Amino acid sequence: MENNRKLLFFDIDGTLLTPYPWAVPDSARQALKEARSNGHLIFINSGRTYAMTPSIIKDLGFDGYVCGCGSQIYMNGELLFSSMIPNELCREIIEKLRQCRIPAFFEHPDKLLYDGKAPTLPEAIRNLKTEVEVEDLSLYTPEMYHTFTFDKFLAFPNVDSDTETFRRFVDEHFSCFIHDDAAWEITQKHCSKATGIQFLADRLDIPIENTFAFGDSTNDLPMLQFAGISVAMGQCDPLILPHCTYQTTDIRDNGIANALKYYHLIP
């Protein structure tokens, strides 16, 4: 089986999780279990940090996680790779956000940070306080403020924001993906969902042609374009289809199971 082992990488939202009220279909649970039984390794590959990965996903028994758009990589409970934004640049980000009047929150592998001195706070912070540890970095001591880091952040420009100035700063230092809800997901240039696949394939000595990526939106493009086989979900953003090998059915219509069967990864 070693020679035929495949690495399977899954996005979370819209790929494994249905739209609200979020759930993992039973057919997907069973398909993932069968894939592992057949000797394949299964991984989450998500923009979410590990702390932001819901327990409904963690309970599925993945072999590992590529989190924060490739900035943290875990396997069998061990952190294998971590890349954090240097503190000096983190502080520069905070100052630039204040100057440009842009609310944001900052993602650390095990918590979220926000700036209590910002003109406004993202609505999401209020909701997330019940799910994950949240810290106000404006309350940090000078020593803490000169040592804290994070690995990526989400910014929420509005009509009062100087988006032009901030976009120039972002483009100089980072990669930026703008979501449908107008949130800016800002990540390290040298980390992506694709670099996560490369890291694990190298570590496990698996050729890239034996890697599979499953996704549904344009922020999955780095891994869909990189993997040996790329699978688009049935309800995906049509913009990803030219970059995918195969389109399966909707997540709610046995999409994961149908794709794994199509490629003979499960019976």
Image: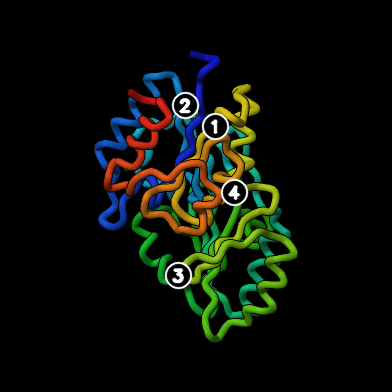
Q: Quadrant of the C terminus?
A: top left
Q: In the rendered image, which quarter is residue 97 located in?
A: bottom right
Which is nearer the N-term, disc 2 or disc 4?
Answer: 2
- Residue depth check, mark 1 versus mark 3: number of the one nearer the observer: 1
The residue that mark 2 highlights is: 41
Q: Secondary structure at mark 2?
A: strand
Residue 31 at what x, y percent from top left?
A: 33, 31
Residue 181 got which mark? 3
Q: Secondary structure at mark 4?
A: helix
Which is nearer the N-term, disc 3 or disc 4?
Answer: 3
Residue found 68% across the figure and 59% down from its top: 174
- Tag 1: residue type? Thr
Which is nearer the N-term, disc 2 or disc 1?
Answer: 2
Residue 211 got which mark? 1
Residue 255 at what x, y percent from top left?
A: 34, 42
Residue 53 got which mark? none
